[in-house]
Amino acid sequence: MSTLYSMLKETVKNRRLVYELAKKDFRAKYLGASLGIIWAFVQPMIMIAIYWFVFQIGFRSVPVENVPFVLWLMAGIIPWFFISESFSSSIHAITENGYLVKKVVFNVSLLPLVKIVSALFVHLFFIGILFLMFISYGFAPSLYHLQVIYYVFASILFATGFSWLASSIVVFIKDVGQIVAMLLQFGFWLTPIFWSLNIVPDKYRFILKLNPVYYLVEGFRSTFIYHKWFWETPSLTLYFWVVTAMLLAAGAIVFKRLRPHFADVL
């Protein structure tokens, strides 16, 4: 735990550097494109529009629990977009920045966090869009909406643990990147984003709830739709934080042990 504490302490200490590097990374992704960083927001919007058209118009999806399908979908898919982008980009944070890894004075553990904060910029934008959509449909803001801060924080810590673990291993085992991409594809359809957990028989629901992302997706829906506080699901909340703590600890330990060998491989 001392390793985890020291890495988190260094992250907080260098938060300004992480923020500045994240802004640079965010701009660099779309450097040279005619629309520039606008693509960061256009692409997810197009995906949401396609999904909405397919399920709402094509399959004629009905409102879910008296909530318009598009709102129910948005509340679930927005946290997934953040987790997916954080995972897929942070896993290559070390290999893409070999020149920084070879600098002894640079704290390499910050690199995965840079990718996560970069993804956070888009995530916060879509949370704002989500607020506007609910308001436009007649759902007035409430005290429960403050809970979104908690779920964003939980998402960041969960993604941080994964990023430390995966980004350090992929330096030595390149196949990890392909495995993560495949798991994200499975995770997208196995997480109740387009479908409600209520359609699954009771005896199988607990298996799907073992997916930590389920907690985040349902958390957003609890915030915007169901108006439930996170402490109203104590067992699920405890499970998520135990998994997140284990992931953070494992990521910190593995990263620290492999860190001295990064430069040799890169």
Image (cartoon, rainbow, N blue to C red):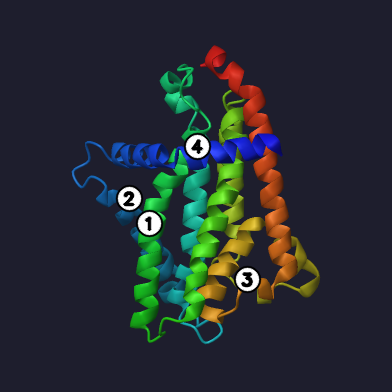
- Classify 10 Å Cα crowding around label 2: few (below 14), some (14-19), many (20 and above): some
Residue type marked 2: Ala
Q: CA distance from mark 4 to mark 3?
A: 28 Å
Residue type marked 3: Phe
Residue type marked 1: Pro
Instruction: Tell me the residue at 25%/37% (across/down).
Output: 31
Q: Secondary structure at mark 3?
A: helix
Instruction: Tell me the residue at 51%/77% (across/down).
Output: 144
| Residue 47 vs residue 161, the one in the foreground | 161
* Quarter assignment of residue 180: top right
Q: Which residue is mark 2?
A: 40
Instruction: Tell me the residue at 44%/75% (across/down).
Output: 71
Q: Residue 177 location, x and y as percent?
A: 56, 34
Answer above or below: position of 107 versus 128: above
Answer above or below: position of 26 versus 132: above
Would you say 38 lies left or right of 15 here?
left
Q: Which residue is mark 1?
A: 44
Q: CA distance from mark 1 to mark 3?
A: 27 Å
| Residue 248 vs residue 36, the one in the foreground | 248
- Classify 10 Å Cα crowding around label 4: few (below 14), some (14-19), many (20 and above): many
Answer above or below: position of 94 versus 146: above
Q: Which residue is mark 3?
A: 230
